[in-house]
């Protein structure tokens, strides 16, 4: 365990040697006054914690141990250290995403390998107390085109403003909306079918209630909005201004300050696309594509007026200042070397 005096500002998910990565666990990063990032050290050694999430009130961090088919909980220790908080919990094949309920009641996990969506109940101390699998996904396009049946590939979860949960299924091109029932787990509510072959990956909810989704395969953005409690697709469009390359795959989408702009990361072309959010959150219009500052922008986030981009293959995090008027990133402000980063999460 590396020690230090600064408090962490970001947790860094990563790939370790079991996934061909170069990291040793969950990393901790601090922020200097000039906006650059400072590597604090490895908070805890862990097997391929490719995505992490933070409890809303407890000093607890959760990680998807992707290649161990587990979800793990860690408790904060010292300035930035983490230590196990309970036993590892079984998950599904290639568990690639975890998300925590803002009220601290549960944790969700999405499993890319076998399509499982799982819910883990939490106690008041943030420890995992129960595990509940959601119902399997059904391909809405089954039998309608060559290549059926297709493998379900759950990829991400989002706790919505109304307390329901939305998950993406990249293999079945569907968004699934669930209700949480204590002691029972995930109960299906309804689903939204997206275009076949789009591959919905990650999503973010705008303050208007609309949900913005980026698709890995088609490199598009979608907007869904609830009408009388049921989400409907109201917009689809390109995720980039340039159109990109056939080998591109989109990764993450996040919002800028005040929700005026969204930022989509595209691997292959290695760009961050700036998209303007129209009034009411009904459309996403590409403004400009900028180089991401490295190779394979796996994940990114905006903190204040700065954009941080994690590059899995070039082992770095690039930091940019954002123009407050146009939303466009300026030149790279700083590059931090860190091995095989896959997720950037506010430490809370």
Image: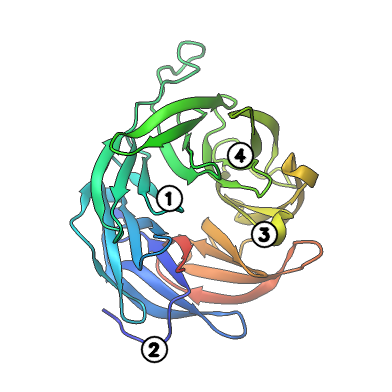
Between discs 4 and 2, the one toward the N terminus:
2
**Image mark for residue 246:** 4
Query: Mark 4 to mark 3: distance in Å?
Result: 28 Å
Q: Where is residue 205 in the image (x, y as percent from the top left)?
A: 60, 46
Q: Is residue 35 above or below residue 71?
A: below
Question: Would you name the residue on which mark 2 appears?
Answer: 5
298 with respect to 283 (left or right): left
Between discs 1 and 2, the one toward the N terminus:
2
Q: Which colouring convention does the figure follow?
A: rainbow
Q: In this view, does 310 lie above or below 206?
A: below
Q: Position of residue 137 (x, y in %)?
A: 40, 25
Which of the two residues, 113 or 64, is positioned nearer the viewer here?
A: 64
Tell me if I can see residue 337 in this picture.
yes
Q: Position of residue 231 (x, y in %)?
A: 60, 30
Question: Would you name the residue on which mark 3 appears?
Answer: 256
Residue drawn at x 66%, y 37% as measured from the top left: 223
Query: Mark 1 to mark 3: distance in Å?
Result: 22 Å
Q: In this view, does 77 lie above or below 216?
A: below
Query: Mark 4 to mark 2: distance in Å?
Result: 46 Å
20 with respect to 287 (left or right): left
């Amino acid at each position: 365990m590396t020690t230090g005096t600064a408090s962490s500002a970001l947790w860094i998910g990563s790939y370790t040697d079991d996934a061909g990565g170069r990291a040793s666990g969950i990393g901790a990063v601090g922020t200097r006054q000039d906006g650059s990032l400072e590597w604090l050290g490895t908070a805890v050694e862990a097997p391929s914690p490719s995505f992490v999430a933070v409890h809303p009130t407890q000093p607890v961090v959760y990680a998807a141990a992707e290649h161990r088919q587990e979800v793990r909980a860690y408790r904060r220790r010292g300035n930035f250290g983490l230590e196990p908080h309970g036993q590892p919990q079984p998950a599904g094949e290639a568990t690639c995403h975890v998300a925590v309920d803002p009220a601290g009641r549960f944790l969700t996990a999405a499993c890319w390998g076998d399509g499982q969506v799982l819910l883990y109940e939490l106690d008041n101390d943030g420890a995992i107390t129960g595990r509940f699998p959601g119902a399997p996904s059904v391909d809405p396009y089954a039998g309608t085109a060559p290549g059926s049946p297709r493998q379900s590939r759950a990829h991400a979860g989002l706790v919505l403003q109304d307390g329901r949960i939305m998950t993406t299924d990249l293999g079945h091109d569907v968004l699934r909306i669930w209700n949480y029932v204590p002691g029972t787990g995930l109960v299906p509510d309804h689903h939204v079918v997206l275009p076949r072959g789009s591959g919905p990956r990650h999503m973010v909810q705008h303050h208007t209630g609309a949900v913005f989704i980026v698709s890995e395969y088609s490199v598009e953005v979608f907007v869904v909005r609830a009408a009388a409690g049921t989400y409907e697709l109201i917009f689809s469009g390109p995720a980039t201004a340039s159109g990109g390359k056939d080998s591109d795959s989109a990764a993450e989408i996040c919002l800028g300050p005040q929700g005026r702009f969204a930022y989509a990361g595209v691997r292959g072309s290695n760009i961050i696309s700036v998209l303007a959010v129209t009034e009411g959150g009904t459309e996403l219009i590409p403004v400009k594509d900028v180089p991401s500052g490295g190779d394979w922008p796996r994940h990114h986030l905006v903190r204040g007026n700065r954009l941080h981009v994690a590059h899995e293959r070039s082992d770095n995090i690039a930091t940019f200042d954002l123009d407050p008027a146009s939303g466009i990133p300026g030149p790279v402000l700083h590059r931090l070397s860190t091995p095989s980063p896959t997720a950037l999460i506010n430490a809370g």
